Amino acid sequence: MSKPTSDEFGDVGPTDLEGGPDEFESEEQPIAHPTPSNSEDAESRRLSLTEKAAQRAAKAGGTHLVLCVTSFLIMVNACRQLSNIKEKYKNQANQPSLGAYKYAVAVGTTSFVLTFLMVLQNRLGHSAAMPKKAKLATSTFFFGWWLAAIVFLSFGLFDKNSNPDLDSSYSELSTAYMALWASGLISIVMLEEDLAPFKSAIQRMEKRASDTGPVFFLVVFSLVVVVEAITPANTSAMLSYGIAAGCIGAFTGVVLLVAGQRIDGRMKQGISIFSGLWFIVAIIVLTTSPSKESNGSFTSAGNGFFALYGSLFASFRMVGAHYENE
């Protein structure tokens, strides 16, 4: 058998190929470019969806949308209460005072209409049309509007003696109660975004709370106990103890805030323990009565109830902080 010659197959050599051996290798072995893994693709998609959700929330009005929802809840609850009370006393000569009900309807309706128009404006893409002064005026209005609503509705400044059927929706834990306080917090956020001095004041308060720890919250919760105790809704003589409990708690906190650096560690520990024991007694006296009328609003889950337990927790936290620093 004869061997194949180069004439049959042709002379093939690396030097005979066009471009030489280097180009041959580059064509046969192209450079591989890195491709993202499945996890990276998923992360990219997730971030993209998150950004889209944030953009949609901003386009929908952000805080205005949330305030619109909470205002709607309060409006519906207030209208239902007003309708029920009118139906109950429809054929009676002595009609109860409807001031609280009408005020609640006005609060919810006004805020709902305004925030709905603002959300609609944002949805139509005209958010930039509102000048800064107009935004500031709107935020200031909502802040004052909801601050007054919390004071009058949640702290019961409407006298229940003139209307014994006055619903406790706004002073006790309920949907209307949560919506009222949420609206107040949202109005603070709105004003903080539009008013630089107010934002600076909030930041200073947050820093003060961070620096002083539970002492700051002891003062705040104790003052809430005092305010809750002196409202017209609480007529029992037992609530004088609530005023005393809040005043002594606030005084204790103020002393620690003002002269805390000059007070001995053992003295601080003693004051903290006294504060804790003081509020344990206050909780027993004010929240464990068998009848709600004898102790006013402290027996139900409302402002006074939460403030008492907040003061107790702050006192215990003060004791714990002392032992942590030893």
Image (tube, helix red, strand yellow):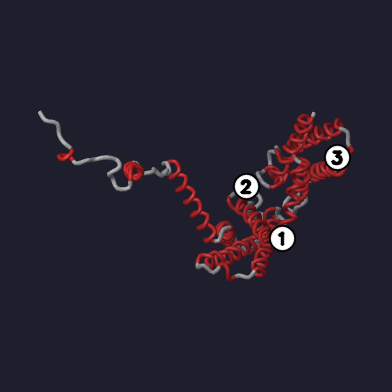
At label 2, the amino acid type is: Leu
In the picture, the disc for residue 196 is 1
Disc nearer the start of the sequence (3/2): 2
Q: Position of residue 40 (x, y in %)?
A: 45, 43
| Residue 249: quadrant of the picture | top right
Is there any visible trace of residue 295 in the rendered image? yes
Residue tagged by mark 2?
173
Tags 3 and 1 touching, CB below 8 Å: no
Which quadrant of the figure contains the C terminus?
top right
**Residue beneath disc 3:** 260
C-alpha span from label 3 to label 2: 36 Å
Instruction: Report the amino acid beneath label 1.
Output: Ala
**Horizontal and vertical percent for residue 200?**
74, 56
Looking at the image, residue 25 lies above or below residue 184:
above
Residue 310, picture quadrant: top right
When asked about the image quadrant of residue 157, the answer is: bottom right
Percent x, y of residue 68: 56, 60
Q: Mark 3, mark 1: which one is toward the viewer?
A: 1
Q: Secondary structure at mark 1?
A: helix
Residues marked 3 and 2 touching at CB (< 8 Å):
no
Residues tagged 2 and 1 counted as in contact (Cβ below 8 A): no
